[in-house]
Image (spheres, grey):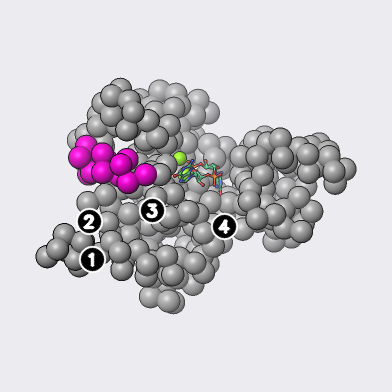
């Protein structure tokens, strides 16, 4: 049956052994077949503004609903997809298509909100990506400014002229570009100087340490200021406690993402989440809390 919780490494290994599926069976080809068979799905995690608590956007996160192994998180299969150019391109194509569909479905319910999708550095070697994305957005009546592409900083695209060219063309089309997991990768500041990103996502390893580490607070404050000075947006990832959210509020203006705000959820759950969120976190609700 389909498992409720994503598996971690050892649990997945156990299950694969029991099913007599060896890890080698999860090849790029298996993944492409799974994508074609509709075994991928997206969950959506909300992002809100730290001070006003306004709903800002959703991040789409891919999951593989394996018919035998159950729900497999992206960490278990991305590396396999990324080793094969055709597979990582097929995944991005599917993910963007599904995100556009979700955007339309939500818009029909009156929830019009930008959606961020993750792409891999390998996708920025695909010259056809900007035009394909533009066509898909047009077909789904999604404004390019409502699509944000998150790319993790990796050694894979420093100095690459091709990557720079593709990122610039995406930006010219009005698509937002976000530098994911900021602070954990390679040559972050050079990337910020050279590449047309409009947002920084501070890696959750810094956010998780905010309450206990003076160093983490200093780093996060500096990154929030850096984003402001560069006129870029800023998102703090992995906000799990109210204490962390309050600290971020003191450090400056950024958006919040994490289990405290909302877990990744199927698209149908988003309007429900939003209703509850607005009831508790709207300015009116805040005024009630404050006794106004
Ligand atoms: P990411 O883009 O940094 O996404 C955030 C990850 O942190 C997600 O894990 C999310 O479920 C998790 N997360 C969110 N809030 C919290 C929190 O408060 N605490 C903790 N501990 N974790 C939190 P997930 O869904 O397993 O995704 C892992 C990574 O896989 C993503 O990291 C992203 O780099 C990659 N990924 C996800 N979807 C896609 C996709 O469609 N395409 C590509 N190429 N990569 C993807
Ligand atoms: Mg991301
Ligand atoms: Mg991240």
Discs 1, 3 touching: Cβ within 8 Å: no
Residue 42: assigned label: 4
Discs 2, 4 touching: Cβ within 8 Å: no
Question: Mark 4 near ligand 1 (CB under 8 Å)?
Answer: yes
Disc on the earlier residue, 3 or 2: 2
Instruction: Tell whether position 243 is magenta.
Output: yes
| Vertical placement of residue 29 versus 207, above or below | below
- In the structure shown, which secondary structural element does the residue marked by tag 3 occupy? loop
The region drawn magenta spans: 241-253
Assess disc 1: are there few (<14), some (14-19) or many (≥20) residues with their C-alpha within 10 Å of its C-alpha: some
Distance from label 2 to label 4 (Cα)?
28 Å
Q: Nearer the viewer, residue 49 or 100?
A: 49
Distance from label 1 to label 2 (Cα)?
11 Å
Mark count: 4
Q: Nearer the viewer, residue 21 or 263?
A: 263
Which residue lies at the image location 40% right of the left edge and 44% below the top edge?
240
Residue where numbered disc 2 is placed: 52
Q: Residue furthest right?
A: 20
Which residue lies at the image location 54% right of the left edge and 40% below the top edge?
120
Disc on the earlier residue, 1 or 3: 3
């Amino acid at each position: 049956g389909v498992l409720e919780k994503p598996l971690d490494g050892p649990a997945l290994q156990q299950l694969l052994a029991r099913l007599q599926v060896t890890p080698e069976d999860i090849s790029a080809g298996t993944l492409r077949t799974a994508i074609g068979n509709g075994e991928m799905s997206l969950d959506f995690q909300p992002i809100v503004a730290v001070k006003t608590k306004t709903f800002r956007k959703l991040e789409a996160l891919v999951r593989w609903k394996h018919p035998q192994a159950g729900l497999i998180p992206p960490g278990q299969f991305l590396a396999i997809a990324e080793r094969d150019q055709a597979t990582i391109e097929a995944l991005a194509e599917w993910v963007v298509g599904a995100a556009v569909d979700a955007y339309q479905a939500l818009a029909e319910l009156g929830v019009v909100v930008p959606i961020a999708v993750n792409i891999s550095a390998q996708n920025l070697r695909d010259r056809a990506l900007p035009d394909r994305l533009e066509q898909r957005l047009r077909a789904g009546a999604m404004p390019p400014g409502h699509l944000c592409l998150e790319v993790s900083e990796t050694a894979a695209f420093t100095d690459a002229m091709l990557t720079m060219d593709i990122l610039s063309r995406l930006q010219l089309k009005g698509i937002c570009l976000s530098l994911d997991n900021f602070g954990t990768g390679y040559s972050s500041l050079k990337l910020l100087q050279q590449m047309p990103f409009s947002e920084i996502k501070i890696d959750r390893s810094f956010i998780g340490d905010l309450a206990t580490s003076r160093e983490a607070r200093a780093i996060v404050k500096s990154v929030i200021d850096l984003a402001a000075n560069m006129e870029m947006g800023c998102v703090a990832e992995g906000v799990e406690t109210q204490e962390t959210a309050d600290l971020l509020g003191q450090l400056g203006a950024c958006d919040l993402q994490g289990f405290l705000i909302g877990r990744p959820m199927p698209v149908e759950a988003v309007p429900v989440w939003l209703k509850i969120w607005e009831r508790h976190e709207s300015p009116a609700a805040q005024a009630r809390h404050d006794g106004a």
